[in-house]
Image (spheres, rainbow, N blue to C red):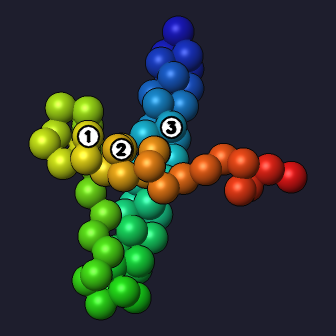
């Protein structure tokens, strides 16, 4: 029983560690884009409730044509 608890705890820790590394890698990549563009591109997490989110979605829909990327 104790071995099962230890195993479960280790598995939980490994999963948490994996998620933290994955998130930190994403943030580093986002910051590198901002750095490489001199701050001209700023990466932010967006949610549909954010004021700027809908305007960005509308802009993408107006400029992106999936036919241009068909194989």
Crowding near pointer 3: few (<14 within 10 Å), some, many (20+)?
few
Question: In terms of depth relative to the viewer, which is nearer, 56 or 15?
Answer: 56
**Residue at 51% over, 23% down:** 8
Mark seen at residue 15: 3
Whether residue 65 is situated above or below residue 10 in the rendered picture: below
**Residue closest to the eye, 28 or 16:** 28
Q: Position of residue 39 (x, y in %)?
A: 26, 83
How far across and how far down the image is residue 12, in percent?
Answer: 47, 30
Q: Is residue 38 left or right of residue 8?
A: left
Q: Is residue 49 above or below residue 14?
A: above
Cα–Cα span, label 2 and label 3: 33 Å
| Residue at image coords 61%, 50% | 65
**SS type, badge 2:** helix
Within-10-Å neighbours for mark 1: few <14, some 14–19, many 20+ = some
Q: Which residue is mark 1?
A: 54
- Label 2 belongs to which residue? 57
């Amino acid at each position: 029983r104790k071995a099962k608890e230890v195993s479960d705890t280790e598995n939980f820790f490994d999963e948490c560690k994996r998620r933290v590394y994955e998130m930190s890698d994403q943030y580093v990549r986002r910051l590198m884009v901002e750095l490489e563009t001199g701050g001209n591109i700023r990466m932010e997490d967006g949610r549909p409730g954010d004021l700027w989110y809908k305007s960005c979605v509308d802009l993408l829909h107006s400029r992106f044509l999936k036919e241009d990327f068909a194989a």
